[in-house]
Image (spheres, rainbow, N blue to C red):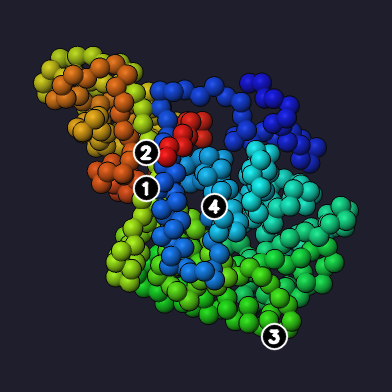
Amino acid sequence: MNIPSQQKLKFWGRTLSSPFLLDTTHTTESWIEISEQALHSNIAAYKNILGANTLLAPVIKANAYGHGMLEVARVLETVEHIEYLCVAQLSEALALRANGIQKPLLVLSIIDVDPHQAVIHDIDIIISNVEVAQYINECGQKLNKKVAIHIKIDTGLSRMGVLWSEALDFITICNALPYCAIKGLFSHFANSENEDPTFAQLQITRFKKVVSICAEKGIHVPYIHIASSAAQTALAESHCTMARLGIGLYGLWPSPSNQQTTKKTFPHFTLQPVMTWKTKINQIKNIPADSYVGYDLTFKTTRPTRIAVLPIGYSDGYDRALSNKGIVKIRDTYAPIIGRVAMNLTMIDVTDIPNISLHDIVTLMGNDEKINADSLAKLCSTINYEIVSRISPFLPRIIIP
């Protein structure tokens, strides 16, 4: 595949091509619709709870949880009170810069390419160990420019970050590095979406202790952030000076218990799912009774059956676990999936739907309780995060008003 030269990025002597910059010819047989109105509505809902003193930092990692990183970023670029856009990897941030995104960017997890590029393109990065901090300082010195860093504090997730009990010494070291500017201190919850807030509150206590000691030592840090989508509505003490908005940005609840907790405190709080996933019928055919459908002969017709073949499969992120139990929607009628979901194709039973035609639009997932991300997640024994985030980045994302 030919990639235009201006869309190639070189790091550590090798050429990388971001999946968000590939010059591909997208199929129009399957696509994702992204509601700009729903994005704005969800932002406003959380901002109303946070108030004027807590800034918002939407998280658009993992291709914006499957919604389209660049497409979502272009919408968020115009929202005045959004302070940062957060990604997981430096390569994601560089792809955003290469596509004209000017908002402040924060890398939350992984410096996967040359960190000099973060300095050049004014991208804030995570720091969680001394060796990386010292190297980042050298990068800044080489370019004669201070590097904006956010120090991650491990308050109980036991993932990335410096242990909260060792944080002061580490922060002191970073604060003394002449080419590093500490812009933020942050942490991440282990279970803020759960009904029992005990451990989340312990994490808040540990985090705020670190922040308080830093203030006492004269280390001023402008951006303090620990609140996730779940914590913003359930744990007011987590708000701090900034809050990161992940799954809630896309109109999806972090968990059923978080939805229940939120509704008790904020009965008028609502979220609007942002994504609708559609495809078109690729083939229609009639098959007799006692016919097998799909791989492994897992479905056998009991009557003459009219089937429609959809050009979508597990390679696109449509879960194989939906075989013989998922449903889709055509106009206002539901149709069951029959047989195995294959790599690129899925069959549905349209016998009872009149006037079906080739290229009719089929909704695979949308704002409908029977085919939303939560219902699909339940059928697949997983969570809504996984359902949306693994949808193929090669399917086109279309912003609709």
Instruction: Give, as a three-letter code, the residue at label 3.
Output: Glu
Residue at position x 15%, y 21% from top?
354
Helix, strand or loop under label 1: loop
* Callout 2–callout 4 Cβ contact below 8 Å: no
Residue at position x 25%, y 26% from top?
348
* Callout 2–callout 3 Cβ contact below 8 Å: no
Q: Which one is in front in this view, the residue at disc 4 or the one at disc 1?
A: 4
Residue 11 vs residue 369: left or right? right
Closer to the chain start, of discs 4 and 3, is 4
Q: Residues within 10 Å of mark 1 (few under 14, many from 20)?
A: many
To which quarter of the image does residue 345 belong? top left
Label disc, if present, on residue 216 of the rendered structure: 3
Instruction: Give, as a three-letter code, the residue at label 1.
Output: Pro
Instruction: Give, as a three-letter code, the residue at label 2.
Output: Thr
- Could you tell me residue 9's position as x and y percent? 73, 36
Instruction: Give, as a three-letter code, the residue at label 4.
Output: Val
Q: Which one is in front in this view, the residue at disc 2 or the one at disc 4?
A: 4
**Which residue, given by chain and number where applicable, does mark 1 sit on?**
273
User: Is 78 above or below relative to 151?
Assistant: above
- Could you tell me residue 105's position as x and y percent? 65, 53
The span from disc 1 to disc 3 (Cα, nearest Å) is: 43 Å
**Which residue, given by chain and number where applicable, does mark 2 sit on?**
276
